[in-house]
Amino acid sequence: MDDVLSVFDTRLLGPMLRLATPILLAAIGGLYTQRAGVLNIALEGMMLMAAFWAAAGAFFFQSDQVAQSAAWLVPLAPWLGLLCGVLASVLLAAVFGLFSIRLRADLVVAGIAINLFAAGGTIVLMQRFFGTKGSFPARARLPDIRLSFLRDVPVLGELFRQQNILLYFSIVIVVIAHVALYRTRFGLRVRSVGENPEAAQTAGIHVRRIQFVTVLISGALCGLAGANLSLGYLGQFTANMTSGRGFIALAAQTFGGATPIGTTLASLFFGLADAVSVRLQTRGLPSQFVLMIPYVATVVALVLVSRRRSRTGRRETSVEVEKAGATP
């Protein structure tokens, strides 16, 4: 028991942030669409497709052909791979938006179709271009940033000792999301469309356009999330490497109350669960038990959200009944 409890120390904080980063990026992307009234089930597929094309792009720009014809591109390989991943995810998001918003297909069905397409499509592409169904190296990684001045600072030293650059991007993205949703005209329109699309349409807001834009934003952020998986700390693409993180991101935005700050805290919670799972794998526990920890945490979080909403609903109902009884 003491051996299991020993995993809970400050050394867990760094992995928590690292594992929470892709969840947070995808969750913020899903948050935009949720506030616009679009439930984006396709986060998983967008992340997976981005992870593949980010690794494939980095691999290509590190190839001998590029080195001979345009050597100046080789040092930029991880960033060009990141761009490939984002573009692939945005393209897939556009397809999802076309079917779900323009053609009015069922959101859940369209999202599941995108996820299945990404799961199967990446394996087919991997076999076609790399001759394998398992994994292939990216040949390049996005850089890590070492904040050496924090090395001896308690807690912060463990948090930011060596983190990928996309972690710091994600912090900026959370701030931008908060400002965009609550301090700009665009954010007001997004929230208006999500809360009452009929009233927004009457006020002259193009509902479908706003929803489509949020889906594209979601695709871009899922692109960063997927690139973080393949280029951030693995340096390779593996079949189905998202492992349900898109669905965990969907749970994070729900658990976080559909706000950027709440979604960030929820993502950190799920990142902590994932980090605990990784640490426990070295403690001799059954692998089946250890690997299910992040998903159990997701189910528990959703149950808590459901209970909270149920209590809120009962409270509002009782208030309405009391008002009705007090009315002569």
Image (cartoon, helix red, strand yellow):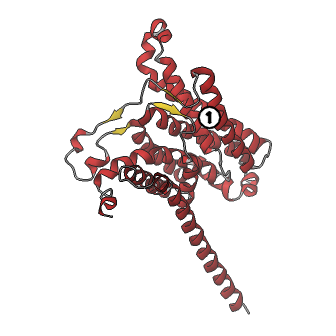
Whether 287 is drawn above or below 161: the answer is: below
Q: Position of residue 123 (x, y in %)?
A: 62, 31
Quarter of the image with the N terminus in it: bottom left
Name the amino acid type tagged 1: Val
Query: Could you classify mark 1 by the number of other residues whose Cα lies within 10 Å: few (under 14), some (14-19), or many (20 or more)?
Result: many
Residue 296 picture location, percent across and down: 52, 60
Number of marks present in the image shown: 1
| Residue plotted at (57% across, 34% down) | 50
Quarter-of-image position of residue 139: top left
Q: Left of 197 or right of it: where is 156?
A: left
Q: List the residue tagged with mark 1.
A: 90
Q: Quick one: SS at disc 1?
A: helix
- Left or right, residue 25 beside residue 33: left
Q: Nearer the viewer, residue 308 or 204?
A: 308
Residue 235, percent from left and from top: 44, 30
Which of 105/138 is in front? 138
- Residue in the foreground of this view, choosing between 181 and 126: 126
Residue 265 on image: x %, y %: 45, 57
Q: Is residue 256 visible?
A: no
Relative vertical location of residue 70 with respect to residue 114 in this rendering, above or below: above
**Figure check: 25 above or below 71:** below
Could one spot residue 177 in this view of the protein?
yes
The structure residue drawn at horizontal position 49% and vertical position 18%, both measured from the top left corner, is: 61
